[in-house]
Amino acid sequence: MASTTAPARVGEIRFNGEAAAGEAIATPSSYWSGKKKVYAWDCVPMVGKLSEEDPSLRTNLFESPPNILTGKQASLGFKCHLHGLAQTAAAGIAITQDDLGYLLKAALGGQHLGTTTSVDPTNTGLGSTSALRCLNTGGLYAGGAVYVVATNECRRIVSVSSPNITLDMDLSSAPTSGLVIAAETTYPDDAALADLSDAAHVTVAALFRGYHTEDQWQVRGGAVEVELANLGAPKPGQLQFTINGMDGEKVSGVAAGTPFTQQAPAPQINSGFYYTTVGTTRRYLDTKSIDIKLGIKREAYPSPAAQQGIAGHGYMGGRTTVEFEAPLDDAFHDDYEAMTAIIAGYQFGRVSSTLGPIFISLPALYHDKDPERVGGQSFTGSKCSMHADNSATTTSDLTLARFAIHRFPHT
């Protein structure tokens, strides 16, 4: 029996894609060496069997018989930073997937890796009222996003017609130079999430390696869920992951993690939530608070022939919601009564030599109820509750997505 203790809520999460869902891991001590990883906290590994009392083995009134072991549970929850890419942006250079990007793709199903370009010196377009002219658009696609260095603004791409890209809202000015940085764009793909046989459906094996020698927990056949957390200035954004497993076990012998380089998270001191009905008017809201829930939940597909009676986990529906407080404005009430589709996006961070920003795009938002009047002595505002819908453009899974998470490299 161990006689030492160690920090409980922090550790390292290692993960790897599976060739077959829930496949056995023969030697964890060697298998987990060199696999993908993230630093994590609020780690909650759950591997073990449930039980219930056996009512049949009681011979007298005061007897308490052993319980019956029932189904096995296997899951792993944790939080980590939502950070940009540890890559250097340059014209003609394509984004590459990093470890966190792999985990996001496993959770949402779809991912697009763009290619950075530059502004054409002859450009006169603001992006939406008139298109932004670029030197090359070969690695940019509708539904993706760009960060325009000259204005320090992120925008969702509505359409691409070389050499022009049309954005969902005008930039603050028409740039004539500078990079147009592409993103790693991760978005919900219904087929990959719901259909276990879809080519893009991913399951992962995951390991929580704590700082106690016996604190090692392994989950297999894992379906990944993700939620946004810690949104709002001046905090760094976070991701809350849950890996729902088909099977799992306590393991031993995996070497303790060693420090590794990870991109710093972007604090939301430069955050901006834009809200527009037409996509041309440049309008940022002074949001006192904001909360975005992705609403992509997984449920088990039962099967008596599968591991622990679980054939896998699929997406069974859900709603993406946005709640925010902003200065009182009758326009919110008007948009609610007219059921107006709102184009929105939330950016935090600005590009630097060490940091890439984060952007969450929402191509169609609708108010769920009449905005609520809120405030105190110094603030009179509107509290708005909205939900996201598919984009009106349905030419691909990327343009159809009701939200996307865009992570950018640094310069």
Image (cartoon, helix red, strand yellow):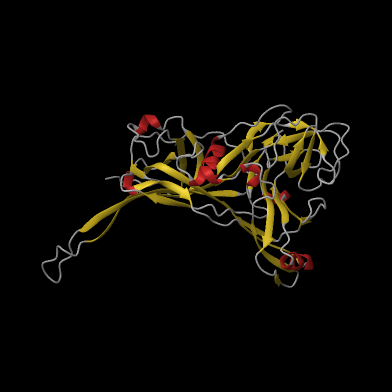
Q: Residue furthest front?
A: 395
Q: Residue furthest left?
A: 59
x, y percent for residue 237: 61, 49
Q: What is the tally of numbered marks visible in this picture?
A: 0
Determine whether, in the image, residue 71 is placed left or right of residue 115: left
In this view, 274 is above or below 84 = below
User: At 56% across and 44% down in the image, what residue appears?
Assistant: 189
User: At 62% across and 47% down in the image, what residue appears?
Assistant: 401
Determine whether, in the image, residue 309 is placed left or right of residue 240: left
Indicate the quadrant containing the C terminus: top left, top right, bottom left or bottom right.
Answer: top right
Quarter of the image holding residue 209? top left
The foreground one among 389 and 59 is 389
- From where the camera sits, is residue 46 visible? no
In this view, 136 is above or below 214 = above
User: At 30% across and 52% down in the image, what residue appears?
Assistant: 71
Determine whether, in the image, residue 143 is placed left or right of residue 108: right
Indicate the quadrant containing the N terminus: top left, top right, bottom left or bottom right.
Answer: top left
Determine whether, in the image, residue 141 is placed left or right of residue 72: right
- From where the camera sits, is residue 284 visible? yes
In this view, 353 is above or below 77 = above
The foreground one among 386 and 195 is 195
User: At 85% across and 38% down in the image, what residue appears?
Assistant: 175
The foreground one among 337 and 214 is 337
x, y percent for residue 136: 77, 29
x, y percent for residue 150: 81, 38
Quarter of the image holding residue 183? top right
x, y percent for residue 390: 64, 51
